Image (cartoon, coloured by chain):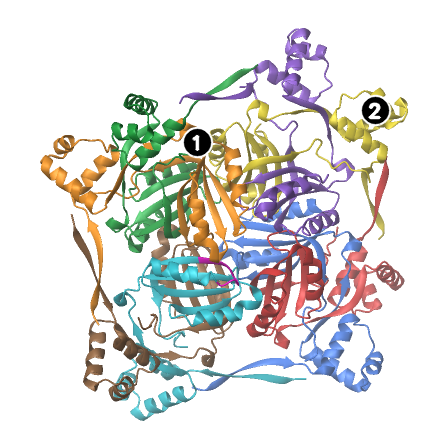
Chain colours: A orange, B green, C yellow, D purple, E red, F blue, G cyan, H brown
Amino acid sequence: MAKKEKNTIYQLDEIDLKILTHLSNSSKTSLNQLSNILGIPVSTVFARIKKLEEKGIIDKYTLSVDPKKLGFNVTAIINFSVEGSHIEEFEKQISNHPNVLFLYDITGDFDVIAVTRFRNIEELDYFIKNVLKNPYVKRTITNIALRVVKESYPHVPLLIE
Amino acid sequence: MAKKEKNTIYQLDEIDLKILTHLSNSSKTSLNQLSNILGIPVSTVFARIKKLEEKGIIDKYTLSVDPKKLGFNVTAIINFSVEGSHIEEFEKQISNHPNVLFLYDITGDFDVIAVTRFRNIEELDYFIKNVLKNPYVKRTITNIALRVVKESYPHVPLLIE
Amino acid sequence: MAKKEKNTIYQLDEIDLKILTHLSNSSKTSLNQLSNILGIPVSTVFARIKKLEEKGIIDKYTLSVDPKKLGFNVTAIINFSVEGSHIEEFEKQISNHPNVLFLYDITGDFDVIAVTRFRNIEELDYFIKNVLKNPYVKRTITNIALRVVKESYPHVPLLIE
Amino acid sequence: MAKKEKNTIYQLDEIDLKILTHLSNSSKTSLNQLSNILGIPVSTVFARIKKLEEKGIIDKYTLSVDPKKLGFNVTAIINFSVEGSHIEEFEKQISNHPNVLFLYDITGDFDVIAVTRFRNIEELDYFIKNVLKNPYVKRTITNIALRVVKESYPHVPLLIE
Amino acid sequence: MAKKEKNTIYQLDEIDLKILTHLSNSSKTSLNQLSNILGIPVSTVFARIKKLEEKGIIDKYTLSVDPKKLGFNVTAIINFSVEGSHIEEFEKQISNHPNVLFLYDITGDFDVIAVTRFRNIEELDYFIKNVLKNPYVKRTITNIALRVVKESYPHVPLLIE
Amino acid sequence: MAKKEKNTIYQLDEIDLKILTHLSNSSKTSLNQLSNILGIPVSTVFARIKKLEEKGIIDKYTLSVDPKKLGFNVTAIINFSVEGSHIEEFEKQISNHPNVLFLYDITGDFDVIAVTRFRNIEELDYFIKNVLKNPYVKRTITNIALRVVKESYPHVPLLIE
Amino acid sequence: MAKKEKNTIYQLDEIDLKILTHLSNSSKTSLNQLSNILGIPVSTVFARIKKLEEKGIIDKYTLSVDPKKLGFNVTAIINFSVEGSHIEEFEKQISNHPNVLFLYDITGDFDVIAVTRFRNIEELDYFIKNVLKNPYVKRTITNIALRVVKESYPHVPLLIE
Amino acid sequence: MAKKEKNTIYQLDEIDLKILTHLSNSSKTSLNQLSNILGIPVSTVFARIKKLEEKGIIDKYTLSVDPKKLGFNVTAIINFSVEGSHIEEFEKQISNHPNVLFLYDITGDFDVIAVTRFRNIEELDYFIKNVLKNPYVKRTITNIALRVVKESYPHVPLLIE
């Protein structure tokens, strides 16, 4: 008895969180700038970022693109009900589609939920009709977003604890 | 009659798309590296990125953070039904919450859908109970994600057209 | 006992139906053209149309307009659940709105269903948010049409019986 | 980069709208009458209508028929859930049926919604039972209209902008 | 044109209605008693009842039995969703079952609704499991009645008009 | 311990059941006829019926009326969701309405279900709009019967056990 | 006629109930302790317990285990919709699974409901995906418990009557 | 950074599990019996049980009671939708009711789910009508169990790992 479970979960202190918050707003901020803003030595900033990268907490440096500027006016949340034994296969297939931004295997009325983005309703129609040709998809419900209220970068809550 | 509607929507050519794709995978890729990979002069790469920035297509440089490493094990998709005249006010309020990653005003059975992330079920419970104290929230349904299948950066389909 | 109920319902014969069908496809078809096409005297065509007008079967001469040409790209079917004692008042109010094409008081999960048409999703959003300010509207579900498959003129089945 | 999308969408001015509104109420209104009512020369009225016809904005001249006078007392809104890969085929087939007035491919809980009109409940029953023999129709929900509140001609919002 | 539809529907006057109401409360009431109660001659009472029988308005003389006295404690309303092309066949089969009191072919979320009565929950369970062996029954929902509020004899509204 | 619960529930033997079955098909069948049909002495038939009446198993003698003959063409199953503390009050009120044939307090998605009968859709519409003026009725769903498949007299399964 | 149904149902008196209540809180309470607490002779306590055991009212002596202490943090209520003719077979199979604590065959929207307990969401996901490989399971909905409010021992209401 | 989260979760070895399994089937099994069955010294059995008790893994010794023997024939699963800010208060109140066996705060269409047990449908009706008098309960759905398939003691999966 009495072996205890261990999980390697990292807890960030206030400095880590401030660094991550600044970098997520502008990942090109220099070490010097961060040092000035946060009032800590450049070497500390460097060491901290290094650690965040090594531990895999910072997964990659990326960018945010404005969908409206590229004409992606239609955001649709699509719920899929899939035949039980083909859910994972379906998820793999559909997650390859570039119009599928976010994809979750869920516990509710449906099996899979996707946030998708298209230029217009015709493109969305074409996408859905195509997915529905998959014989394992039993049912879909599509909710078109009247407005995108928030899409944060990164995909993690960053709050001072 | 016959005035025609104009929309300033930018269409990217293949080079733009390749640049965006590379930068979204690693926004620290240098101009030289991009020049080598794509086989086009550094000056062209520079000019293209400059334009993408000026037009606001590249919105900001940011980073991707691994939720699991920080102990965010619970991803929940929450559907809210809100009293009609208070939807926008509710959306503003809830979008300030760091645990709310993505938030959409939708057309279906519910008025608002949120993708949220928490450390554990207790935190999620606390969040929901708090939201439900808002007298304009009529109903919520929470679907916990059994698995996060895909969360792409950036939030735009980047495909060669 | 034994008084029998009478309903003044007109049953059309084949000639009436053919005339109505032709006029609905092109209400500017002349009496002569109809006479030629149907192989019956002009005087008969005239008398028949006269009767159809007098009985109120032909309600009015109107026209069909192409929504796409005017930029009406978004057709939405909206279901309203309204507080019981305010349904009729709500129906009057909303039926005055030009974007509401068809409106029915129904027996199902919702009380009222409307077929609506807008230029874009923003206009639809504005319309819905406005309707939802009505305190008697308890719930709406909006289904955006991926395609308009059929919208017949006139709104009556015309088939040879 | 930077090619801009063009859509040939016509925007009507106040005169166009007034002409369309008058013709939709009575498409037999003469050029002279319109000239008098609107206070513009007959030649202008003529030219405007000509353009509206040429551009295809006026699709056809048609008529409005009173369903009650012909004994069509039952209006039913029918929702169909159809096997994914047979939706378009099903839509074609069912749109040929004269009792189907309006038909939309939608995004919600069901795949197709139809506004239908029948003489009585027996006719509606016969229609539904027939449709249900199609093996690709998985489910239907029929809502009978307690009242037809509005069915506008034409199927486009005509409002002064 | 202009042939008018005729329906042989009988409208009852006040005397007919009073007779039907009395007989439905006690069909053994004698002609003399009815004559006294209603204040009309026996011969009129006789003639009226004769007509009501001949026209088939009075379908049969029957009796009301108290379910509780026979131990029928469980009343269940069962909704059936049946494969489209087998609904009528299913209805025939199930209507033969003595525990099925009332059976309707309906327009809503389900295809058939039955009011059923059983001695106890085990009997109901046995019935449902048996019905579910029919491969054309796709889904059932059973609502057990917490109370039987009203079950009128006869199955027609009898009100003075 | 060990007091045992007693229920006064009567179990019918084959003769009781046969008598009830015959009387429910024609409650005017004479004792002699029953004696002949069943092959048992008149005195026994008499004694049996007497007992069935005394125990209250035979509740009353009544009649079956044909709704179609009186023009009651619309049968609607109406589901009511009522504010919790007013369900019983609502049930009393609505059960007084002659168009409500059967009324049950149920366990499912709705609180009360009623089988109702009307001459036409307008009458049904009037009834529903009236009920909805009751502020405690939160929601109704009306399913119109496409066909009445079975409505048995009496409201008890009579089968040989 | 008139045979009366008998059920061997035991009704407990106040002493039985007090004994059961004490034993359910601590089944190791000695006869002497119970005698003292309840103020009745040891021999009576002994006799009563003996009877409760002999009649099978006390089914077995068991223990309560704290799930949190063993890391079972995820309680999920799972609803199963199963093909009609395979429900009982499915129930047998799934009830053998140790993570299934409680299992009921129900009357509602679903056929079977299970209360299940797992260490974490991954284990739950694995369980569900496995169950869904059963071709007779048509649909599942999983509700994760945000909190376990009550799980009483024993599974019977013990109240003084 | 890098403080690691610790959870005091105990993992049982095979011997612990075997002891718990035996005691849950019969908590009166003596140390000697367990020693014989498991083939380990009495002192070890004693020490193990002692630890399981001290750590709070064994929460209490209790008993299993047969509901059928006491006439509890009706098991109902009740779903409650409660006004957001009163959920916890409602849960406290209802969990005091002896007929409520299991109670969970859930994430789905409803806020609270209860497994309840009653002698008959009238008792259940009385309970529900009482709960519905609570003004914060917006909606309930009751599913009566056709069969109780499994209710395990204890409420934890005990499987050899």
Q: Are marks 1 and 2 on the same chain?
A: no
Residue D53 in which image quadrant: top right
- Cα separation, mark 1 vs mark 2, equals 50 Å
Amino acid at pointer 1: Phe
In this rendering, position of residue H118 left or right of residue E15? left
Front residue of B140 and C35? C35
Against D41, is A88 above or below?
below
Which chain contains the residue that carries disc 2?
C
Q: What amino acid type is highlighted by mark number 2?
A: Leu
Give the prevailing secondary structure in the magenta stretch.
strand
- Left or right position of G48 against C85: left
Q: Secondary structure at mark 1?
A: loop
Q: Is residue G135 magenta?
A: yes
Residue C70 location (% of width, % of height): 57, 23
- State whether residue G15 is above or below residue F67: below
Q: Residue F137: in sight, yes or no?
A: no
Segment colored magenta? G134-141
Residue occupying the point 74% across, 51% down: F73
Q: Which mark is residue A72?
A: 1
Nearer the viewer's eye, disc 1 or disc 2? 1
The residue positioned 55% from the left and 21% from the top of the image is D9
Asked where in the image residue F106 lies, by quadrant, the reply is: bottom right
| Residue topped by disc 2 | C34
Note whether B4 is above or below C54 in the view shown: above
Please tell me how many numbered marks the rendered image carries. 2
Label 2 SS: helix
Question: The disc numbered 1 marks a residue on which chain?
Answer: A
Quadrant for the N terminus of chain B, please: top right
- In this image, B33 relative to C14: left or right? left
**In x, y percent, where is residue B48?**
33, 23
- Residue at the bottom extreme, as displayed: G43
Q: Residue at x 37, y 79 (%)?
A: H64
